[in-house]
Image (tube, helix red, strand yellow):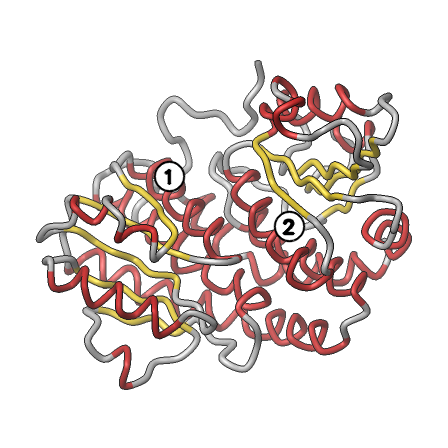
Amino acid sequence: MTTLGQHTYSEINAQAEAISAAWNQLELQQDWIERYLNNAAFEEIIFIGSGSSYYQALTMAATCRAWLGRSAVAYPSSDLLLFREQTAPSYRNYLVIGVSRSGESTEVVLALESVQSLANWTIAGITCYEESSMAKLAECLVSPLGKETSTVMTKSLSSMTFMMQAAIAKAAGRHDLLEELAKVVKQDGATVLAAQPFIDTLVREQSFIKYVYLGMGALYGLSLEACLKIKEMSYVWTEAYGTLEFRHGPKSIVEPGTLVCLLLSEKARDYELKVAREMQEYGAFVLLLTANKGEDTSFADAVFEVGGSDISDEARSVLYLPALQFLGYYTALNRNADPDSPRNLTQVVKI
């Protein structure tokens, strides 16, 4: 049994419990939802984060637009801190939600501090550490079991993404969406258990020289996160794109030995599968992560069912994460890299 990546392995496997705890915690923070997400005074909601937190912010913003019908965007924390005039015109009323696992990322904290005293700006946050600098600066949703020992984000990202989506569903008063999210709470453990041997076997049996992740809608941010996850843990060069955008130039990099991993949506399923077929014709190994297999996916080289075929793409999004996280983890082990201690990285980035 390898001693590499023990914390990362445990934390990937613990995300179902972390999601369940976030679901329960939200019942204790209903006032946060009313004070921020249900406040009609805010003309736009801005989610900010750095690294993985920025990528999950993209998913949070996409979910907010789709479910709450509010103007919502996501930016890197540094854009708001250093380029506020280009990021957010001063004449609007803004809610800025900082996204940070530790609540200590310098860029997030400084960005929130830079606008907290300005007229027409209100700050809030989501984190896993209730005593963090960000939590002391702004009222935060807290994922109580999202705390991690490992450097890379796994269960923290899953639980915070899910928690914000659940907050958005509650703010929208959408009982149908809350029922979908309740199904995710029940499904996630089974998805984690199924993803581990599937990805372990895939990595053992295949060898790739390039890695490409594709996704659209709320899944686009998670495709960027998947790209970062394998890059952080394994040190392999990889890229991520919007699925159809990949056809406009970037597909030139595809050749035999290229893994194309598609986070398949139901909304754009037919279009996205056409892209996957095209990449396979160029020599790519096509891995599909999908709600359900079908005749239309039988061409693929590997297909993993994440579950949640009866729920929306947004609600299903965190179910894609276990397989993506395990792909980074097992690729690292295959390269004799330690996922717990990736080179050049620290758990908290400060400037």
Amino acid type, callout 1 = Pro
Reading the chain from its start, which is encountered first: label 2 or label 1?
2
Q: Residues within 10 Å of mark 2 (few under 14, many from 20)?
A: many
Please tell me which residue is depicted at 56% across the width and 46% down the height of the picture: 58
Please tell me whether residue 80 is drawn above or below residue 144 in the rendered image. above
Q: Position of residue 169 (x, y in %)?
A: 74, 65
The residue closer to the viewer here, 333 or 68, is 68
Report which residue position mark 2 lands on: 160
Of all residues, the one furthest to the bottom in this rendering is 295
State which quadrant residue 237 falls in.
Answer: top left
The residue closer to the viewer here, 179 or 191, is 179
Q: Position of residue 39 (x, y in %)?
A: 88, 50
State which quadrant residue 227 falls in.
Answer: top left
Please tell me which residue is depicted at 16% across the width and 44% down the height of the picture: 253
Amino acid type, callout 2 = Met
Report which residue position mark 1 lands on: 339
State which quadrant residue 199 falls in.
Answer: bottom left
Secondary element at tag 2:
helix
* 47 relative position to 336: left or right: right
Q: Which numbered mark, 2 or 1, is in the foreground of this view?
A: 2
* 91 relative position to 200: left or right: right
* 207 relative position to 74: left or right: left
